[in-house]
Structures are given as structure tokens and as C-alpha cells.
Image: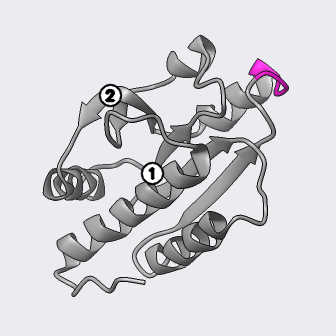
Amino acid sequence: MPAIRILWFGRETRDPAFALASEYEQRIRHFTRIERVRFNDEHAESPRHIDKALSNINVVITLDERGKNLSSPDFAATVGQWENSSIATVGFVIGGAHGLTDSIRKHANWTLSLGAMTLPHRLAQVILLEQIYRAYSILRNVPYHHG
């Protein structure tokens, strides 16, 4: 079962979205290891620092509205494929206010869309974490519990 790492750019504030993201993160821990790693800003972080953070991730998925759209069952099937493979870590990268740099995009195995609209990083985290939790609920045939 691969660990999940979510890399995101931006500031953490006293926003209710972060509390909700933490709640989904805790729910996911019942299924697999997960961690969220924050970078201050994509322009402030050195490329070497970001390269190092991405280097030990087997599958890197960037989030972008131009990426691949998956239904929740299709996303769950993808998570199931990761579980049945030798993948140790899956990483999702959420850009900051200026999106993702080309140096980050070059690491991506593929790009996932959460929808055609541009989302702030704090909301993108909540949606991504909710979908990861939903995927594991589908795979384990566990009743989905809403917040």
C-alpha cells in the first residue's frame, strides 16, 4: 500500500479549510500513511529543495485544471492499481498563487484535474483529500461518512 505525500505551496492560515483538510487526513490514516508538506512559495523555494522533495516519490501527480478528469470510481480504481503494484509513495503537487513551475511539471508522471475551475490551494487540498478518502472507502467497501 503506497504512502501518500501531498506537496503544496502557500501559507497556512487560520482558515476553516485547513481544519477540514486535517480531518480528512486523519480519516485517510486508517487506510494508509499520509503526510502534507508545505512550501512557502514556489518562487522562494530553491529548485534543489523541491527536486529533493520529489525525488523519493515513485509517482508524481500535479494538479491542474487542464489535467485528466476522473470520476470518483475511476480515481478509486487508480488508487487500487497503485496498491497492487510496487509503488512505495504517490505524491500530489498543488501549486500556489502562480501555479506550478516548469521545473516542477517535469517531475510529473501525469496531471490530474479536480475540475475546470481554478481553485485556491487550501480548497484544492480539501477536495483532493476528500477524494482520496472516498477512493479508499470505495475500495474497502466501507460506508462513506460525511463530515
**Amino acid type, label 2:** Gly
Residue 129: % across, % down:
45, 61
In the rendered view, tell whether residue 48 sits above or below residue 16.
Answer: above
In the structure shown, which secondary structural element does the residue marked by tag 1 occupy? loop
Does the magenta-highlighted stretch encompass residue 119? Answer: no
Of the residues tagged 1 and 2, which is closer to the observer?
Answer: 2
Q: Left or right: 130 with respect to 119?
A: left
The secondary structure that most of the magenta stretch takes on is loop
Q: How is the image coloured?
A: one colour
Name the image quarter holding the C terminus: bottom left
Please report the residue visible at 17 percent of the width from the left and 50 percent of the height from the top.
71
In the rendered view, tell whether residue 95 sits above or below residue 82.
Answer: above
Region of the chain picked out in magenta, as a range: 43-47
Toward the viewer: 113 or 133? 113
Residue 59: % across, % down:
42, 37
Q: Where, by quadrant of the figure, is residue 68 drawn?
A: top left
Q: Where, by quadrant of the figure, is residue 65 drawn?
A: top left
Residue 143: % across, % down:
22, 87
Q: Left or right: 136 with respect to 95?
A: left
Q: Which mark is residue 88?
A: 1
Please report the residue visible at 85 percent of the width from the left and 25 percent of the height from the top.
44
Residue at the disc numbered 2: 67
In the structure shown, which secondary structural element does the residue marked by tag 2 occupy? strand
In the rendered view, tell whether residue 125 sits above or below residue 114.
Answer: below
- Spatial CA span between label 1 and label 2: 23 Å
**Amino acid type, label 1:** Ala
Q: Which mark is residue 33?
A: none
Residue 19: % across, % down:
64, 73
Please report the residue visible at 56 percent of the width from the left and 72 percent of the height from the top.
20
